[in-house]
Amino acid sequence: MAHEAHKKAAEHHENAAKARHTAADKHAKNDPTAAEHSNQAHDHSRKAHEASKTAHDKSTITKK
């Protein structure tokens, strides 16, 4: 179960990184959708953080 939690956290981290790169590209091109991509990146980062905390907690419980 802890393995799946870590896998989910990694997926969220990857999505956050992709969204940040897209947002940076859009900002560099003065694309009007840049702000929306930044918001998506922030949302993915928040989900990644929560998933990482969950994975850590499950790993800690499993090891006790």
Image (tube, rainbow, N blue to C red):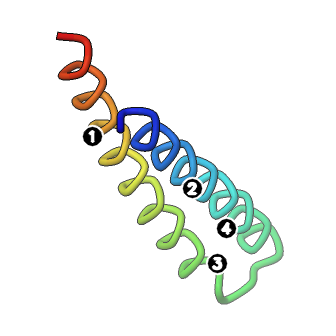
**Relative side of 14 to 40, left or right:** right
Question: The residue under label 1 is which amino acid type?
Answer: Thr
Q: Secondary structure at mark 3?
A: helix
The residue under label 3 is which amino acid type? Ala
Give the spatial CA distance, label 2 vs label 1. 17 Å
Between marks 3 and 1 in the image, the one whose residue lies nearer the viewer: 1
Q: Quadrant of residue 57?
A: top left
The disc placed on residue 54 is 1
Is residue 29 positioned above or below 11 on the image?
below
Q: Which mark, residue 34?
A: 3
Q: Amino acid at mark 2?
A: Ala
Taking depth in this image into account, of 56 and 61 the one nearest to the observer is 61
Disc on the earlier residue, 3 or 2: 2
- Label 3 neighbour load within 10 Å: few <14, some 14-19, many 20+: some
Camera-nearest label, 3 or 2: 2
Label for residue 23? 4
Residue 20: image quadrant is bottom right
- The answer to whether 7 is drawn above or below residue 46 in the figure is above
Tally of marks = 4
User: In percent of the image, x 18 and y 22: which residue is there?
Assistant: 61
Q: What residue is drawn where x is 35% and y is 38%?
A: 1
Q: Quadrant of the C terminus?
A: top left
Q: CA distance from mark 3 to mark 2?
A: 15 Å
Q: Residues within 10 Å of mark 4 (few under 14, many from 20)?
A: many
**Which of marks 4 and 2 precedes in the sequence?**
2
- Helix, strand or loop at label 4? It is helix
Does residue 7 appear to the left or right of 57 in the view shown?
right
Residue 25 picture location, percent across and down: 79, 66
What kind of element bears circle 2? helix
Say which residue appears at 38% left-offset and 57% top-offset. 47
